[in-house]
Amino acid sequence: MVDYNHQSKSSDDVLDPNLVIANPSTQEKSSMEKSNEKAEIQPSPAEKGDAETRKDVEALHRVPSGPPHSIFTQRQRYYISFLAAWGAFFSPLSANVYFPALTTLAQDLHKSNGAINLTLTSYMIFQGLAPTIFGDLADMIGRRPVYILGFVIYIGANIGLAVQNNYAALLVLRCLQSTGSSGTVALGNGVVADIATSGERGKYVGYVSFGAMAAPALAPVLGGILSTFLGWRSIFWCLTILAVIFLTVLVISFPETGRNVVGNGSVPPQTWNITLLNYLQIRKTRHDTSCGQTAIDNDLSATKENLAKQRKLRWPNPLKTLRILAEKDMGLLLFYNSLVYTALYTVMASAPYLFAQIYGFNDLQIGLCFIPLGVGCSIASLIIGRFIDHNYRRTAKTHNITISLRTSDSLQNFPIEITRIQVIWPPLYIGLLSILAYGWAIDREAHLAIPLVLFFIMGVCLTSAFNIMST
């Protein structure tokens, strides 16, 4: 729960215990007690006091001051990251759980494999378009309402997919399913920016991306089991149940983090945007309100009104988000990430047909083959953030820049681009070589162990190369 009645103090308001201002009278008395010989070589009390004062003032200038970047405690930030990772899990889950059942779907709906593959293509198209709408909407009303809206759409689409009987409905509902779930990945990155400073952002990005990267390990296995023993419709019923569970937890306990709504977390959100737990907490707090607390509430209300004036509710404009492509640096980053993602997804989408043709596997066996890839993706999402943060601190130390995990760091003179790119080359090159080796192994119909090992390497390296440029 978030204590909106807590007001954090600026570090400028806290007395530094190391700051000692010399007392001239005391120093003068002590200096008179010393021998004349030592007095000749010692600085005068005034000079000594000025020197100490200057030294302490310089030290103060090196310490970042101002309000904290986020008032959420570390425990709360871990919980928020966990829920964001859980939400981001659904988009790749919905894509990958579908792979083992592609052949079965083609047979049941009397369609070719190419036609069924169009449902993968349409899913990916809306996977790219949905964040442009949901991201713009989240900037206006906050993260939490957009999460709720997305999962309401997602649950409805899954119910429709579970009961549909024709290819047209499958194609349309897959687009709707992608629309509801795909915004969660972008929202997760936004949540990280809300609660974490640049110095620790890599760690939290790793935590949040773990949900998206764990899906390739679990989804195909789950899809294979459900498709083999309960039929392909059970896949969508399972997704519906999982989404309802997540949405319930989200409504009860996921706090609003959008800085345009709650600032650093100290400003309460709109009444309709408060979690159930926070609503109960606020009722209890108001019951025990004191005069001093009333003054604090008035200050928070004024801040809340100022933030509300800065937000303009309008129809989401995806073109506003697409303007980022016109910026050279962002355009190149998005182009790079799209290439890495396309390379990995091409391997994953073609694997079910190739493994069924070469090794004669059924749906369950094909799903099990994705485990090494998913394990590699999960490991990468957990460890690469640590390397990113380590290199961030190393670069700051090299350039004599003081970083703070409490307040936002100024990146005006910080070589953030070099810091990120330095880490990317080893995983990128190894990942690309593993794709070439995988193509050779499949073409030669090599032993199953070879493509599985290469799956793991691709998972570790390509996921790392993708996540580095996403921070």
Image (cartoon, grey):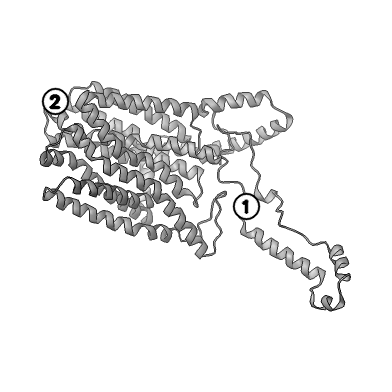
Residue at (32, 48) in percent of width and height: 463
Question: Earlier along the polypeptide chain: callout 2 or callout 1?
Answer: 1
Quadrant of the image occupied by residue 124:
top left
Q: Residue 339 at what x, y percent from top left?
A: 27, 51
Query: Which mark is drawn over residue 291?
Result: none
Observer able to see residue 35: yes
Dot 1 amino acid type: Ser
Observer able to see residue 109: no
Quadrant of the image occupied by residue 307:
top right
Relative horizontal placement of residue 313, taking residue 49 as reference (left or right): left
Relative horizontal placement of residue 70, taking residue 183 as reference (left or right): right
Dot 2 amino acid type: Asp
Q: Residue 356 at what x, y percent from top left?
A: 13, 38
Quadrant of the image occupied by residue 99:
top left
Residue at (27, 44) in percent of width and height: 373
Relative horizontal placement of residue 272, taking residue 118 as reference (left or right): right
Q: Residue 71 at what x, y percent from top left?
A: 58, 41
Is 294 placed above or below 449 here?
Answer: above
Q: Secondary structure at mark 2?
A: helix
Q: Residue 455 at what x, y percent from top left?
A: 24, 47
Query: Which mark is drawn over residue 65?
Result: 1
Residue at (54, 26) in percent of width and height: 277
Q: Which residue is mark 2?
A: 108
Q: Distance between the Cα atoms at labels 2 and 1? A: 64 Å
- Location of the N terminus by quadrant is top right
Is 13 placed above or below 2 here?
Answer: below
Tally of numbered discs: 2
* Mark 2 Cα shell of 10 Å, populated few (<14), some (14-19), many (≥20): few
Residue at (86, 72) in percent of width and height: 34
Residue 228 versus residue 450: which sits nearer the camera?
450
